[in-house]
Every structure is written in C-alpha cells, then in structure tokens.
Amino acid sequence: MSNAKVTPISGFLEFLPEGRIVEQHFLGVIRRTFELHGFASIETRAVEPVERLAGKGGDVDKEIYGVVRLSAPAETSEAALGLHFDLTVPFARYVLENAGKLAFPFKRYQIQKVWRGERPQEGRYREFTQCDIDVVDVGHLAAHFEAEMPLVVADAFAQLPIGPFVIQVNNRKIPEGFYRGIGLTDIAGTLRIVDKLDKIGPVKVTAALQEAGATIEQAQQCLALAAIRSADESFVAQVEALGVQHPVLQEGLAELAAVIRAGNAVRPGVLVADLKIARGLDYYTGTVYETQLVGHEEWGSFCSGGRYDALASDGRTTYPGVGISIGLSRLLGLLVGKGLVTASRSTPAAVLVAVTSEDDRPQSMAVAATLRTRGIPCDVAPSAAKFGKQIRYAERRGIPYVWFPSTEGSGDGDSVKDIRSGEQHPASPETWNCPAVDLVPQVTGVNRG
C-alpha cells in the first residue's frame, strides 16, 4: 500500500480543513434554523429497493448507484438495492412505514449524503450533502405550508455569507392548465423541454417542442408563458393577457398568488414568481421552487423542491407533502472553490499553548486542560522549539493567541499574546476570557457581506 499511486475519483467533494470549517458553520446555521421552525430531525438508511427509486424519479433511474455484496454467491437472488439519489423518496417510504407512530402534520428535517451517477462537472457531484425540510399530512395538506417552505430557507440564507439570493416559485398547475388550454396533451414532455430554456435557449426549445408535436404557434405561446416573471402578483394579469382559459390554470394562478403574497408579507422581494420553473422530477404536483444567487445565475439552482400529492401512498391513504432541499455541497463547492467564502483559521483552536521545554510539557498540558474546561478550544505546541517557531506554527493555522506558561524560578506569571497585534498581557488560565469573536473560527464572504 505504501507504494500505491493515489488516483483521484471525480465527483466526490473533499474540503481542506478551512473549507470543512465553512461547511460545519453552514450546517450549524441550517440545522438551528430548521429546529427554530419546529422541524424534527430524522435520518433514513442509505439504500432503497431499486424498484422504488426508479419508479419515483422519472429519468433519474439512469443515475442510480446499485449496491452489491462482492462476496455474494452469483446465484444469490437478493432484492436489488440502490443508493438514494435524493431524500424525498426515502422520506416518503419512512412516512408509510411509521404512519401509525407519527403525529400529523409531520414536519421533518433531514441532512444526509445522497448519490447520483451523473457526469461530474463544476457544482455537480456524484456524492453530495442535501439539507431537506418537508411537511406531510394525512389526506389533505394545508396550502399555507407551500409558502412556509421557502421562508424557512430564506431565514437560514439570511444568516449565511452568501450575498443576495432569489427563490423562484412556480406552480405546476399553471403550465399544465395552460398547455391543455392551447391543445397540448403531453404535459410532462412539454415541461421537460421548457425546463431546459436556460440551458439551450428559446430557439432550440421551440425546435424541440415542434419535434414533440407542437405547432409553431403553440411553441410560441409556451415561450410567452415561460417569459413571465414578477416579484408581486402582477404575473396573474400577465398570464390572463395571453388569452388562455382552463380550470387547472386558474387554480394554479390562485395558489401561486397566495404563496407570493405570503412571502412578500415576511421577506419582500425574496420570492419571485417565475413561470419557466418546472423542476425535472415527475412527482411534483403544485408549487415548485428553485433558488439562485444574484450575480451568479449561471451557477443554476442550489435549493429546490415543491409540492407532491401522491408520492407517499399505501393504496388506501395518501400523505401529501411539500418540501425544499438545499444542495449544500453544490453551493459550497462553488463558494469555497472560488474563494467567495472563507474561514478565519484552519483549526477550531483559539489558543496555542507554548512549550518551554519538553520537561515542562505537563505544565503546558495543564494550562490547556484548564482552558478547555472553560470552553476555550486550544492546542499545545507539538515541540519545544524556539518561541518564534511556535508562533509561526500558530500563524500558519490562523490561531490568534499564543499562551506562554510561567517558567520555574522566573518569578513571572503566565502571559498570552495576540499574535495579530503583538500585544501581550499577564493572564491566568482560570480567569482569562477569550474574546467572543475569536472563540470560534469566523466564516465570512468575500465582497458578498
């Protein structure tokens, strides 16, 4: 093994220590925000039957990683298992298995790894972390939850150094009713084509719609609908001006207007009605969400979701739900990778306790132990090198303070030095307080607030 060449595997994100500190900070803020909104934490198994995964994900079944036992006999007929490609499908299964023990409406959050066998590229990985919230109920789900989902996410993002963002909202009933109103019947196929508008442009979308059976007039109407975007309820009048009538369309317009109205009452301008948003997965039936960073729209969406009415059903009872998912690895892979978010140091330690000599190491260890009992993270110098070298050790890691224990017979007490300013003061490990701003690594955005 010592002579084996290390071959990188693409699509698997591994941060350096600074990046991991950023990730942990984001996770802490997101987890705390979810809990402040009353969402309970669960964790589901990593695998599901391939039949369940393939049956609920539309085209995503092509991206499922299968799981096999390498030592299993060839004739073994075990059920085919796959790694989950999102957290919604396993959550639906979890609800069905535990329905008799859950209190509805059930609000859960889930932060786990997921896996997709797609081609790795910037911001897209084969293994990544998602942070999900969902609400499910029995038989009927109140519409107000569809406005709550993006507002919870907005609360979390407002506490993170990511800069301005916009949560784009649509309702699948709007394009469905509109397409039916102009005579199109392949709703799912049309949605998939229009969903590629940002990637391939209107000319290619028009051609694809015609290849799928739409007339040039129908294709142009689809593009006219997709072009509508507003931060208020004015999108309703814009759609009505296109002159298309259908009951499903009217229902979708009313539902989306309610979501935008509720969003503007809490966080004006954060929720935007964008009628080209479709979402690729088949199970969404109502409101759908996508999120972009302002100024980095080319990165695409890093937080999405929507309402689903039939994903969780045992044949007798249906558990409709709505949820939204933060693609944390996608977001941080771009922000950290481009240096737009950084940590103030690469270690949790706020203090490096210097070692005068190896014989005096127990004294340094005792100082560190006392500081830790008071909640001050610290490290002890790895060697009794010259103090200048120990200070450089701290500097390379971003540790702001170096502690110098008193030496026997010197008559001097302990002292602590802020190596950024050069100031050094007498200190006692029993009473010295680390400034709150230095107690934990600070995560900041570069030119993004």
Image: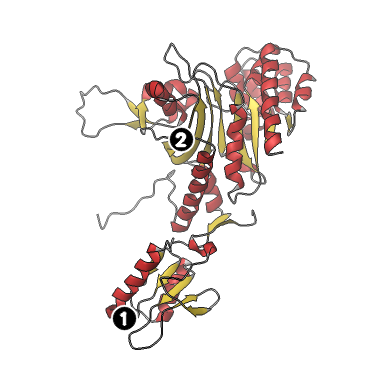
Q: CA distance from mark 1 to mark 2?
A: 51 Å
Tally the marks.
2
Q: Say which residue appears at 73% left-offset and 34% top-offset.
A: 231
Q: Is residue 312 among what the camera can see?
A: yes
Q: Quadrant of the N terminus?
A: bottom left
Mark 1 surroundings within 10 Å by alpha-carbon count, few (fewer than 14), some (14 through 19), many (20 or more): some
Q: Nearer the viewer, residue 428 or 255?
A: 428
Q: Nearer the viewer, residue 203 or 87?
A: 87
For mark 2, give the secondary structure: strand
Q: Which residue is denoted by mark 1 in the rendering?
A: 357
Q: Is residue 382 among what the camera can see?
A: no
Mark 2 surroundings within 10 Å by alpha-carbon count, few (fewer than 14), some (14 through 19), many (20 or more): some
Q: Give how far across and how far down residue 439 sits, in percent.
A: 49, 62
Q: Say which residue appears at 51% left-offset and 28% top-offset.
A: 135
Location of residue 221 with respect to 412 vertically, above or below? above
Residue 65, quarter of picture? top left
Which mark's residue is nearer the viewer, 1 or 2?
A: 2
Residue 99, quarter of picture? top left
Q: Give how far across and how far down residue 127 sits, in percent.
A: 42, 40
> Which of the numbered marks, if any, corresponds to residue 133?
none
Which amino acid, by three-letter code, is at mark 1? Answer: Ser
Which amino acid, by three-letter code, is at mark 2? Answer: Ala
* Badge 1 vs badge 2, beta-carbon distance below 8 Å: no
Q: Give how far across and how far down residue 317 sits, in percent.
A: 45, 14
For mark 1, give the secondary structure: loop
Q: Which residue is denoted by mark 2 in the rendering?
A: 40
Q: Give how far across and how far down residue 237 sits, in percent.
A: 79, 23
Q: Say which residue appears at 48% left-offset and 16% top-offset.
A: 318
Location of residue 30 with respect to 106 vertically, above or below? below
Q: Say which residue appears at 42% left-offset and 15% top-offset.
A: 314
